[in-house]
Every structure is written in C-alpha cells, then in structure tokens.
Image (tube, rainbow, N blue to C red):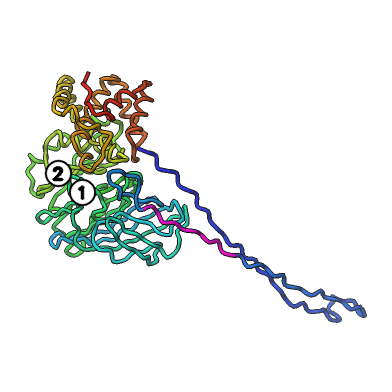
Amino acid sequence: MLTPAARAIFLAFALAIVVACTGDSEEPGPGDGGAVPGIQTATPALTATPVPTATPVQIVGVRGAAQLDNPVFPSLGNGGYDVSHYDLDLDIDPGANTLDGVATMTVIATANLLAFNFDFAGPAVSAVEVNDEPAAFTREGLELTIEPANVIPDGSEFTVRIIYGGTPELLLLPDFPIAMGWTPFGESVMVHGFGLAWFPINQTPSDKATYTMRITVPQSLTATATGELTAAIRSGDTSTYVWEVTVPVGGVAFAVSNSELDSIPGPDGLNINNYFPSGSPEALKERFDIVPEVIELFNELFGPFPYDSFGITFLRGPLPFDGFSPSQRAFLLSTGDRLIVHEIAHQWFGASVTPILPSDNWLAEGFATYAELLWIEHTSTRDLSDDAARRMRVGISNTTRPPAIANSGAEVLDRAAYIRGGLTLHALRLELGDDDFFDVLRTYAERFRHSAASTADFISVAEEVSQQDLGQFFDDWVYSRPVPPLD
C-alpha cells in the first residue's frame, strides 16, 4: 500500500525570560576591614537595564481538509492530522438497541490546526474534548467538525475525546449496494462496513491506526471483535470484553451474540479462536477445520500470516452478507469452503494490504476470488483450477468494466472487482509463470504490509520482480473495456 506521507517536524517555540536583579550595597565602616581610614570609598550605583518584553509567537491555524481526493466517496477522509490510536469504550444494550460510546483518539497534527473533522454518522454527540479541554463542535451530513480552544501546533501529539450515545442507524452511501453499520438481529447486534456508522473515524485507508475496544454487554452475551481478546471482566449483570489491535488497521468490527469459544491450533503457533452460537453441534464446528490448512497454504503462496492471531465468528440471522473479514477476524453466515477461503485470503489482501481508492478494490476482491481457485488447485489439480478460471471468463460479458476504473459506489463490489479482477491474476500467472507470479504476490504483500496500495503499486512490483514491461498487459486487463481472452 501507499507509504503514508511523511509527517512534518514540530517546531517548538521557547520564550527566554531574562531576570535583572538589583540590590543595596552597604559601605563598610571602620574596623570592618573593607575601607582605608581617611579615604572615602565610592560605591558605584547599580542601574537596572531595561529588558525588552518578548512577544509570544502567534501560530496561524488552518482548518483541516473536510474531505480527500476520493472520486467515488468524496465526503470520506479528512486532512490535517494522522490518528495513531483509537480507544473505544462501548456500552451496548441489544434489547434497547442502544450504543453509548466514548471514543478517545491519539492524533498527530500535520498542520497548525484551527479546526479539524472526523467522519461520523452515529448517534448524537454530547461532548468533545481536545487535550482534556472542552471543544466546540458542529455536525453536518457525515462530518463532525471540531474547534479546539487553542490552535494545535503542526507535528504535536494531541488527544480528542468524543462522548456520544443513542440508537445508531444503518448507513447507506449514494449508489453503494449495501447498507452498513449497526445491524440488530434478534437479541444480537452486528457492525460491518465503514466504521463512521458507529464511531468517529478518519475514514480513509491512508490513515491506519491501532485500536483498543472495551465492549460492555449483558452478561448472557459475548462480544467478539477485530483483534485479540486480552480481558473479559464480569461486573454485576454485564461483561466487558477488551479487544486489542496492535498493528495499524483501516477499521474494526464486532458482533454481540450468544456465542461460545472454540479454539483450534494453527500453523506456526498461530492462535485460532472461533466463536459459534451457543449449543452449536460439533458437525458445524468441524466445517471450519480447514482453516489451519488454508492459512498454511497461503503462508507459502502469499508470505507469512500478517497477524499474531485469527478467528472466525459464525452468526445466524438476517444479515446482508455471507461474510466479511476485517483484520484478524472473519464474520461468516455460511460454512462453504470457498467462502472460508475467500475471507481468509482477505487477511493478506484487503486487511493488511488495503486498496487505497475504491477503483483499487479489485486488489482485495479479485485477489480473494483467485485464492478460491488456488484452493481448488491445492485440493484437486491445476487442471481443475484452470477450468474454473475459464468458466469464469465465459460467465462474464466481454464489456465488463475494467476493474481499475470505478465511477460509482455500485461498481466497487461488482463482478468486475471480483471476477475480472481474479481473472487478471490468472492471466498474469500464465504470462509470468508460477515462480515469478508468486514472487510478485509475496513481494507485494510484504512491501505494503499494514499499509495501503494502489493498482500502480501492484504493477510496479510485478514489473520489478519479473523484469518485464507489463504496461500493455495491465492496460488490456485492468484499464480497457474489452475483456481479453485467457491465452
């Protein structure tokens, strides 16, 4: 992924204070040994020298950008700062369908900030503090604008605390095919998609951060989330689950449901902590016994697993997806092998290496789709995976849009991102041969680990590793309208 922009150096202004001292001098008398008898000793007067008063340096503040250069979702993302850590304290009552939250962000200013924005479509905000001082705030559309009491100097670290609460609503962005965010079902609740639906965030892949989530729920329920569980604390009729994400990620998710833990060993000492609805039969849990083998295969093909732990939360309910996979955890409603494989592949491509723009989303969905074919090849033969690729090619229109060009939210998750994106990788494998192809994938995954990348970044890695000019190949496959044949 794209390397984050270099942060500006903080210029600290120090005011030097000069203190001038004056005092009385007592003339020594006879016998004091300080004067000669008969001779008058003159004591020079001490005159105070005026010291000019230093004028404090005035820092001229600017308003951080309220949006970034995102042609599909122009309102998302903000400028003027980088978030390094989110601390989310969430109190959830699924029965009442409410969320009370305190979001505390550790932030580095990249400009002298008079005001700055977070993306937020969640419940009502009751208070905002910047560096523990009350700050003014306004909300309009998806923007929460904050004006601190003092200008935040460029390069300085500061904290923002936002207190909010109420009933969150689903977020539906223009032309985007899926409603996202807060999704209650039965006695449970699930959050998915863009985080701005339920907590204030700088919603851009270029500003990844670490997270601490403390999720308090009724004691009969369990909160499973992105990251690794570090504590489960019972207090009265509630339980608080503490989830930590110690590497930078583009976002987090969680589910609150009646579930129980089922741990299985993973390759190379990896912890795999799965959660299933309480009372689930062993046959259901055994459907996920392939997880260690899938990870082991992708460790070989894509490089080392990007995180220290992984787990699957299996859910039952009327949710708008079969599965999705933020960092370190997949949330699934189906037990199909290909879905499991697809979501695990997202740990490398989508979670660790995140597409930087919506038009780059084929770098996540196309890669995960092709990972399904690699699993077919692993469990059967190369011929079957080739046949599957050619059936995919027959199944899409010759005029399916080029995957690296997206003009609307509806195109971000269409067949071009998934199918044509996956076919692009199969065609690249045929072009380069297995050795160079998998070296490209491993190099790309390692170079942009826990970062964000573009289509141009992937092309650059492919040309560097293969020592070939692949301009025409990628122009045909990801930038041009007709879908090329699979040669």
Labels 1 and 2 touching (C-beta < 8 A): yes
Say whether residue 268 is visible.
Answer: no
> From the image, which quarter does the C terminus lie in?
top left
- CA gap, disc 1 and disc 2: 10 Å
Q: Is residue 319 above or below residue 443?
A: below
Mark 1 belongs to which amino acid?
Answer: His
Mark 1, Cα crowd under 10 Å, few <14 / some 14-19 / many 20+, is many
Q: Residue at x 14, y 38 (%)?
A: 288
Q: Depth check: give the residue in front, 66 or 27.
A: 66
Determine which of the numbered discs, if any, sits on residue 264 in the image.
Answer: none
Residue 357: percent from left, percent from top: 31, 40
Question: Which residue position holds label 1?
Answer: 192
| Quadrant housing residue 337 | top left
Tag 1 secondary structure: strand
Q: Is residue 421 above or below residue 326?
A: above
Mark 2 belongs to which amino acid?
Answer: Phe
Disc with the residue nearer the chain's start (1 vs 2): 1
Give left or right: position of 164 versus 66: left
Residue 119: percent from left, percent from top: 30, 54
| Quadrant housing residue 289 | top left
Determine which of the numbered discs, if any, sits on residue 321 in the image.
Answer: 2
Q: Is residue 385 above or below residue 42?
A: above
Give left or right: position of 80 versus 437: right
Residues drawn in magenta: 55-65
Q: Is residue 58 found inside the magenta-colored segment of the image?
A: yes
Residue 341: percent from left, percent from top: 18, 34
Residue 43: percent from left, percent from top: 82, 75
Outermost residue, right direction?
Answer: 38
> From the image, which quarter does the N terminus lie in?
top left
